[in-house]
Image (cartoon, grey):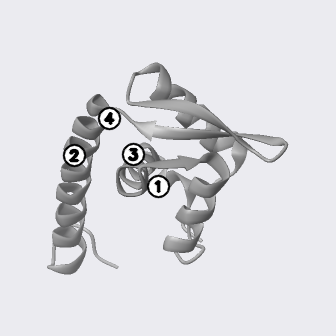
Amino acid sequence: MIAKELFKGTIRTIVLQLLAKHHKMYGYEIMQTIEKKSDGKIKLTFGSLYPILHKLESEGLIYSETENIGKRVRKYYILTQKGVKEKDSKVLEIKEFINTLNQLLDSGGLIHA
């Protein structure tokens, strides 16, 4: 499992990227997808995911709509155009950061194991 501190700054971008790829998703589906795609290394709780979803929604990066599934109501989250732009920008930023970390860690950079 990856320490929460390592992925904390990227989870918003991960959620935006998932919504871009899947069009719309509900909270539990987002949690399960992240866990599955990370081979169980990143596990979110409802208590950590929903504040992020609410913040993204309040910032206009996503919106929600509800659907009746039998007797249940399911809330889906969908990316806005503003969210697409934010996702694109943040994905590039994270990739640049990862490349910088790789340079530091793998090529005799400042950090020695």
Q: Which residue sits furthest right?
A: 71
- Please tell me the numbered disc located at residue 16: 3
Residue at image position (25%, 73%) is 105
The Cα–Cα distance between marks 3 and 4, rounded to whole angstroms, is 7 Å
Residue under the image location 56 percent in, 61 percent down: 3
Q: As shown in the figure, which amino acid type bears the numbered disc 2?
A: Asp
Estimate the spatial distance between the alpha carbons at disc 1 and disc 2, rounded to whole Å.
18 Å
Amino acid residing under circle 4? Gly
Left or right placement of residue 8 versus residue 70 in this view? left
Q: Residues within 10 Å of mark 3 (few under 14, many from 20)?
A: many
Residues packed near mark 1 inside 10 Å, few (<14), some (14 to 19) or many (20 plus): few
- Among the two numbered marks 1 and 2 on one chain, the one whose residue lies closer to the N terminus: 1
Q: In this rendering, would 113 be left or right of 53?
A: left
Looking at the image, tell me whether mark 1 or mark 3 is earlier in sequence order: 1
Q: Quadrant of the C terminus?
A: bottom left
Q: Earlier in the sequence, mark 1 or mark 4?
A: 1
**Disc ID at residue 83:** 4
Other residues around mark 2 within 10 Å, as few (<14) / some (14–19) / many (≥20): some
Distance between mark 1 and mark 3 Cα atoms: 14 Å
